[in-house]
Amino acid sequence: MRIKKFVAHSLKEATEQMKTELGPDAIVVSSRKVTRGGPFNFLGRDAFEVTGAIDDAPAPAPNTYRRRQAAGGFERQLEQSRAAGDDETALTELRRIAEQFGDRQADDVRAAAAGRRRSDTGLVELRSDMEDVKGTLKAIVEQLKYAHLPPMPDMLQKAYGRLIQHDVDEHLAADIIQSVYTRSNQDQITNKVYLEKQLLAAIAGIIPTPDVEKGRRKKTKIIALVGPTGVGKTTTIAKLAAINKLLSGLDVGLISADTYRIGAIEQLRTFAGIADIQMDVVYKPSEMSTVLKKFRGKDLVFLDTVGRSQRSKKELYDLAKFVFAAEPDETHLVLNASTNVKTCEEIIDQFKVVKPNRLIFSKLDEAATYGPMLSIIHRHNLPLSYVTTGQAVPDDIRQVQAPQLAAMVYTGEMAHA
C-alpha cells in the first residue's frame, strides 16, 4: 500500500499527477483546497491537494455479478475470502500505522515544545499534517472494511454493510443476504424498492413469534418476569398490569417476591393502590401456593421477582425456587436493549435455570442500534413479547411484530406504535 499527496493548480491536474505516478488503479482518498505560501503570505495562491493511494497487491478477479450456486453459498464465499487474509492483514497493518502516527505526533509535539525547535506556527502545521495522515489512514480502512466480501451486486453489498453497521452478527447478516440473493433474478437484484422489501421480509422470517393461545383459559394465567438488576422489571410489571386491567378489562393480581431491594414492594404497592389491583407479597417459596389461592378466579396474575446477577449461581437457584413454586404459564426474561451482546449472551445462558420462554427488551430509547436484539432473538429462538421505550406507565410499552422489528433493525429507527 502506497500513499502520497499531490498539489497542483486544479483538482484535475492533481488527480492526473496521482494517476501518472501511482498508476490508473490509484484511488483518491481525500482532496482539499489549500493556500500556497503559508498562512501569513497574503499573496498566496489557492491550490488543490489530492491524497492518493494504491494497493500493490494483485488485483482481485473482476466482479461478474453471476449468481453462485456452490454449496455453502454466500456464507461459504465469505469464509473463503476471509481465509486469504490479505485484506485483514492490510487492515491490521493500517491500524498499527495509525496508532504509531498518533504516538509519534505526541512525541514530536513534546519534543518541539521542550527544545523550542519550532515556532508556534510550525507546531500548528505539524499537528495539521499529522491529523491529515491519520484521517487518510482512517479513510482507507473504511474503504477496505468490506474488501473481503465475495463478489456480489453493489446494492447487496451495501445492504450487508448496513446490517453490520447496525450491529447484526456478520454470519446472520450473510445468511440474510444469501436468502435474498438466491431467490432474485438479475433485474430484481438492481431494483432498490424490490430489494429492500425482500430484505425486510427475510429479516422478519427469522424472528420467532409467541404461540397463540387457543380457546378460553379455564384457570388463572400466571406471568413471571425475571432478569438482572436494574433492567426495569417492576416498572414493566406495572405497565402490563395497567394495560390488562384498564384497557382490556381483565381481573388482574400482583405478587411481589422482590423482598431484597429497598422500596421495591412499596413501589408496587403504591401502584396497586392507585390502579385498584389486588397485591400480595411472598417471602419464601413455600408461601407461594397459599398466596396464589387468594388470586384464584382472576384472569391474570403477574409475579415480580428480585433482580439477580447472572454471575451468582446460588442466587439464581434461589430465584428459580420462587419461580417454579408459582408454576408460571409464561416466564419473560427482561434485558436492557443497550446492553452489549456478549453480556446479554451471558445473562441468557445463566438464566436458563429459571426456564424463560419469552424475551422483553427494555429501554429501547437508550439503545444505539437494534441489530443485537435480532442476533440474540434468532440465536436463542426466544420470541419477543414486549419492548419498553421509557418510564411512563402504561404508555411506554408495546408489542412489536416481526415486520416492525425487521424495519427497526434495517433502518436503525424505532418503529411507531
Image: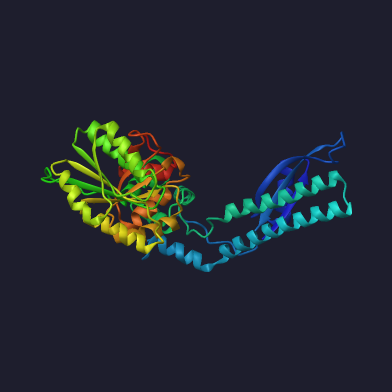
Q: Quadrant of residue 356?
A: bottom left
State the residue at coordinates (30%, 61%): 353
Residue 181: tell me if it is visible: no
Q: Specify whether 152 is left or right of 180.
A: right
Could you say which is closer to the camera, residue 397 or residue 146? 397
Q: Position of residue 383 (x, y in %)?
A: 29, 50
Q: Quadrant of residue 414?
A: top left
State the residue at coordinates (40%, 42%): 408
Q: Is residue 378 above or below residue 417?
A: below
Q: Specify whether 318 is left or right of 83.
A: left
Could you say which is closer to the camera, residue 126 or residue 344? 344
Q: Position of residue 58 (x, y in %)?
A: 60, 64
Residue 351: tell me if it is visible: yes
Q: How is the image coloured?
A: rainbow
Could you say which is closer to the camera, residue 306 or residue 107? 306
Q: How many numbered marks have been drawn onto this rendered protein structure? A: 0
Q: Is residue 238 above or below residue 25?
A: above
Q: Position of residue 115 (x, y in %)?
A: 88, 55
Q: Position of residue 377 (x, y in %)?
A: 34, 53
State the residue at coordinates (27%, 32%): 275
| Position of the N terminus by quadrant | bottom right
Q: Quadrant of residue 31?
A: top right
| Position of the C terminus by quadrant | top left
Q: Specify whether 3 is left or right of 177.
A: right
